[in-house]
Image (cartoon, rainbow, N blue to C red):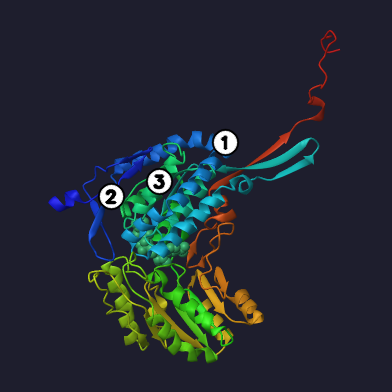
């Protein structure tokens, strides 16, 4: 117990205060490179969670009535504070999540871009108007906040994904309850402190921690109007159904199996580098990782070179110089990835590169898996059907573009895909016919900037409106339509009446 007492604890953020939970249930947070316990996160008690929602609810009226220019100013200060602290936040991410420092900086940077975009709220949130729908009658709409909104985040982007959620919601005038992933709460806690420093009033953002009970609490609480979720299909489908049943808006970004289709006319050098980077970067723990390659025709001959390039990647703890990929999040994740590789082999795939026995000097207890390539994979194999979420590239073959398109469209997921080609017509045909929400043409990870939206589709998304961009504003607002008639004859007489009033004559 002596050791446990010394372990730092993650605080709750309730009503503007960082407070220690009174819970008896704690979850250990491990550094994935060493598996040492670095912190403990509480499963917030029912009364703490109630206090967090009550605080959001209490803060809502003032916040929603605050001039939009004042809210914009807070976010302008916030984006500057994130920039100034980017390196510190990144270190926290590497410490708890394991990704390389360079990649952690990318994590913060992509979230920062959403905060910067939130600063353009004054143009984004405009309503519509139509004058003179009949004599002296006009119609106009306001985009108004919903009230208390909530976000449930995954472990793989500890900064970016919370930043997809609360800034857009709050700049629109909502107050927000965040539940970060219980495995990586540190970055969000830091971001919350910066948000407070930027001038966010107490209670506008509250943070609770926990697992299923916290999720159920959010899905069921009558004062929560909307839920943004990012994570696995298992959790996302459940949250979508439970939250929707309770009358809430829910948007859920979920799992993926992203295909990179390589045409024989592609720029080989570029394509192989892009494939390797996008398959193994972040140890494959990205929802937009290019985890599946379809080599078309002659491009199949490039496989040995692909393997050579993958071999050159350096596996190491994320804070070590020169690391290309770090560890997986947990020993369980590592075991799962290894067993999916094993299943692939058993089901007939050829293991061209096996990262299961990688040794990282000084980090022998870390959850490392090196780049792994399974070739001759067929669509009925488990390693193709399941999202692996590790540094494993599964390679399929197709004779023609049409065959590749059919494969991609038969896969249930629709998050991202890329085509590598030097032929514009091939690229256009692919982009047009493929049923996937985000398509890269010679771009391996086509994550849109926040002036667009993140448009995953099919099994990768549930809901009607996507994250950030115009769709994000729509998700976090509702329209009020006002039809008003001001009769011309009632207009106030412009000139002051200087003559004696004659009482109606
Ligand atoms: P996860 O679903 O395990 O966890 C996400 C959140 O849901 C966490 O806050 C967790 O506490 C909660 N949760 C977990 N299991 C739950 C359950 N059974 N019921 C209710 N709540 C539950 O996801 P993860 O492992 O943290 O993240 C990896 C997954 O997220 C991958 O599938 C990845 O593709 C997906 N992801 C998708 C996107 C996207 O934009 N499409 C982005 C990032 C990650």
Residue 91 appears left or right of 502: left
Residue ID at (76%, 41%): 131
x, y percent for residue 338: 30, 77
Return the residue at label 3. 192
303 to 96, vertically: above or below: below
User: For this rendering, which residue is in front, 366 or 290?
Assistant: 366
Mark closest to the chain's N terminus, 1 or 3: 1
Image quarter for ligand 1:
bottom left
Residue ID at (27%, 68%): 332
Q: For label 3, count other residues whose C-alpha is less than 10 Å away and answer few (under 14), some (14-19) or many (20+).
A: some
Q: Which mark is residue 43?
A: 2
Please say whether residue 95 is visible from this viewpoint: yes
* Ligand 1 neighbours mark 3 (CB distance < 8 Å): no
Residue ID at (37%, 65%): 99
Residue 366 appears left or right of 53: left
Q: Which mark is residue 21?
A: none
Whether the residues at callouts 2 and 1 have beta carbons within 8 Å, the answer is no
359 to 53, vertically: above or below: below
Mark closest to the chain's N terminus, 2 or 1: 2
Per the model, the C-alpha gap separating discs 2 and 3 is 19 Å
Whether the residues at callouts 2 and 3 have beta carbons within 8 Å, the answer is no
x, y percent for residue 443: 55, 73
Q: For label 2, count other residues whose C-alpha is less than 10 Å away and answer few (under 14), some (14-19) or many (20+).
A: many
Identify the secondary structure beneath mark 3. Answer: helix
Please say whether residue 291 is visible from this viewpoint: no
As drawn, the residue found furthest toward the top would be 500
Residue ID at (25%, 69%): 363
Return the residue at label 1. 67
């Amino acid at each position: 117990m002596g050791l446990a007492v010394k372990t730092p604890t993650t605080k709750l953020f309730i009503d503007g205060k960082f407070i220690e939970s009174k819970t008896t249930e704690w979850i250990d947070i491990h550094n994935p490179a060493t598996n040492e316990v670095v912190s403990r996160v509480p499963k917030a008690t029912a009364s703490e969670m109630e206090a967090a929602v009550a605080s959001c609810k209490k803060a809502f009226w003032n916040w929603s009535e605050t001039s939009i220019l004042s809210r914009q100013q807070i976010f302008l200060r916030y984006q500057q504070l994130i920039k100034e602290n980017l390196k510190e936040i990144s270190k926290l991410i590497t410490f708890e999540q394991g990704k390389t420092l360079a990649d952690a900086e990318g994590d913060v940077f992509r979230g920062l871009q959403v905060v910067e975009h939130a600063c353009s709220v004054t143009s984004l949130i405009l309503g519509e108007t139509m004058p003179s729908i009949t004599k002296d009658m006009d119609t106009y709409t306001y985009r108004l906040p919903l009230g208390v909104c909530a976000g449930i985040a995954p472990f793989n982007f500890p900064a970016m994904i919370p930043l997809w959620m609360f800034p857009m919601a709050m700049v629109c005038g909502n107050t927000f309850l965040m539940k970060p992933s219980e495995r990586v709460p540190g970055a969000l806690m830091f971001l919350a402190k910066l948000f407070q420093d930027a001038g966010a009033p107490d209670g506008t953002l509250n943070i609770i921690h926990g697992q299923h009970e916290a999720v159920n609490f959010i899905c069921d609480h009558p004062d929560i109007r909307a839920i943004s979720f990012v994570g696995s299909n298992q959790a996302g489908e459940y949250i979508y159904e439970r939250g929707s049943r309770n009358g809430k808006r829910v948007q859920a970004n979920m799992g993926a199996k992203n295909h990179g289709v390589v045409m024989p006319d592609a720029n080989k050098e570029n394509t192989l580098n892009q494939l390797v980077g996008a398959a193994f970067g972040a140890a494959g723990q990205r929802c937009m990782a290019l985890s599946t390659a379809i080599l078309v025709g002659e491009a199949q001959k490039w496989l040995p070179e692909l393997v050579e390039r993958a071999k050159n990647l350096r596996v190491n703890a994320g804070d070590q110089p020169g690391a290309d990929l770090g560890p997986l999040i947990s020993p369980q994740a590592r075991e799962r990835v290894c067993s999916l590789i094993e299943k692939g082999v058993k089901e007939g795939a050829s293991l061209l590169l096996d990262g299961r026995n990688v040794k990282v000097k000084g980090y022998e207890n870390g959850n490392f898996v090196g780049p792994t390539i399974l070739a001759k994979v067929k669509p009925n194999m488990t390693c193709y059907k399941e999202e692996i979420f590790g540094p494993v590239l599964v390679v399929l073959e197709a004779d023609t573009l049409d065959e590749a398109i059919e494969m991609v469209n038969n896969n249930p997921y629709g998050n991202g895909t890329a085509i590598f080609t030097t032929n514009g017509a091939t690229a256009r045909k692919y982009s047009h016919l493929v049923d996937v929400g985000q398509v890269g043409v010679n771009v391996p990870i086509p994550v849109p900037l926040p002036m667009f939206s993140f448009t995953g589709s099919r099994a990768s998304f549930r809901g009607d409106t996507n994250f950030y961009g115009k769709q994000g504003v729509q998700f976090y607002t509702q329209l009020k339509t006002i039809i008003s008639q001001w009769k011309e004859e009632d207009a106030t007489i412009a000139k002051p009446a200087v003559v004696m009033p004659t009482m109606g004559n």
